[in-house]
Amino acid sequence: MIKNLLQEMFLLKEKGYYKQAIEILYKMLEAAESKEDTAEIIYELAETYFFSGNIERSIHYIDKLLDIAPNHIDAIKLKIKLLDKNNIQRVDLARKLYTLTNKPEDLKIYLALLNKAKMYKDTIAYINTSAKDYCYQEIAEAYYAMGQYENVKNTLCNQNNLNEYCELLLAKVCYAINDEDSLKLAEHKLAKSNTPEVIKFIMRVEFDLMNYGKVITLADKLENLYNNPDILYLLGISCLYTKHNFNAKKYFNILCEKTNEPKHKFALALSYIQSNQTTLAIESVTNSPAYLKIITLLLNEKAISKNILIKEFLTTFDIFSHDELALLTVIDISLRRKALDLADDLLKISHNRKNLRYKYYEIKLLIAQEKYKEAEEYLEQYKSNENFILLYAELLNAQNNFSTLESLLDSKKSFEKNEFEQCCYYYARILESKGDYERAIDIAQKGLDFVNNYSEIYYLLLYSLYKHLGEKLKAIDCLEKAANANPDLRPKLITEEASL
């Protein structure tokens, strides 16, 4: 009878008919003749209640079973599952389980639970056990949580055929310790992954490397993009920097609706400025005085003298330590307006040292300060990064090294459209150095068709070119236009006009 009932119970359980299976188990419990049979029936009851979703009844029968059979292996394993969030109790049970079985798979369970309970030192204590190679993931996790990145790397690199989780952990460590070669290898192995955590990590890495196009492409792989504010923010900034204004506004608007954070509203305001929607830009930050000040200064930049600009930005320092976009925006304005001391002060504020945009501006500052040798040494470190090619061109231009500049530009035929304005400037400078002023003027005028933030340097160049040709009125007209872009040039304009 018991055997027939047992077969019927397993069949019902397998098909998901838990209520009927439980009814049979109660009948079997009444008919049980030995302590061992009783224990096994109680376990089946607990497990069937677990499968049916009745956790409370499942725990009741597991506790009842452990009272009569405290070393019941399957019961201990099931109770570990049932406790779910009670990590300390689960650790105690897992320790007992491993003590009873001494199996590496049970040690793995124990160490995983130690990590969940943040008892990382207890996990590390098993580094010299015979089962350490079976539990390397848990040991690596503990090292990672403790910030011992080299130990994580050593633990994982000694293993073959890492799973995706461990490959991601290794990539994070390589990124943390600036091991670029190992990071590239790890990224290569993860490149085809569709796992959200992997994609998010690679997006952050590519963002810090200023590879904004890759960030935008990777975002297409994420299904629940709008439910992840941090990643959506990175995507929005990537669109902002690559001048995909429509998408930038879309992402930042979604963020502002979800979070109502001032820094997201500031990002939205910047996207509105790029689209020449100045009223909406101001409205976005109306309730955030520090951000409103930055946006107002940005919109009125061409009408404000450098000294006032510096004074106003100094009063907004409090937000820069927690808003990278605001800090980088002001650094960019400071460099553009030759407020070099302010740019230097801003670059000294604590920030994410892995974001190459900071290094980009540090080198740009060195060029503006005429510290060419130091700038060249830094550029040598980043010559493999496409983002720094035009920065190298800027250095060569500042040094009047036009032969090398021309070779550099000719070797890079694939400059993107948003960089073409600067390329035109450099080609015009090369032609100026050769005395071909009329062709230089044609190239500079072409650059003005693409110009965004660089009208000042173009008009100053045209001013110089027309002076070479002796066309003073055209030269002064260009100088006046440069002064409209930068009010600090007005004294020079007055002097030139007086000399006519």
Image (cartoon, rainbow, N blue to C red):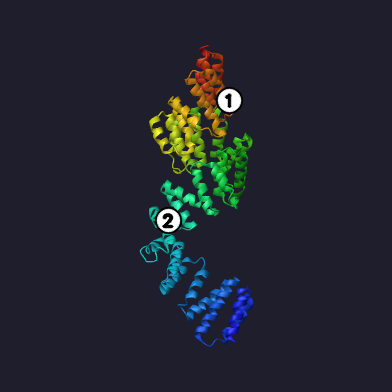
**Vertical placement of residue 260 versus 2, above or below:** above
Q: Is residue 286 visible?
A: no
State the residue position of label 2: 144
Give the residue type that dot 1 points to. Lys
Q: Quadrant of residue 142?
A: bottom left
Look at the numbered disc 2 and give the secondary structure of its residue: helix
Q: Earlier in the sequence, mark 1 or mark 2?
A: 2
Residue, far bottom:
33
In the depicted view, which residue is nearer to us: 379 or 22? 379
**Vertical placement of residue 164 versus 184, above or below:** below
Give the residue type that dot 2 points to. Tyr
Quadrant of the rendering where the N terminus is positioned: bottom right
Q: Which residue is found at the position 37% from the left and 66% from the top?
A: 130
**Vertical placement of residue 195 versus 313, above or below:** below
**Vertical placement of residue 149 versus 400, above or below:** below
Query: Residue 132, position in %: x, y?
Result: 39, 64
In the picture, measured across the screen, residue 422 lies left or right of residue 15, that is left
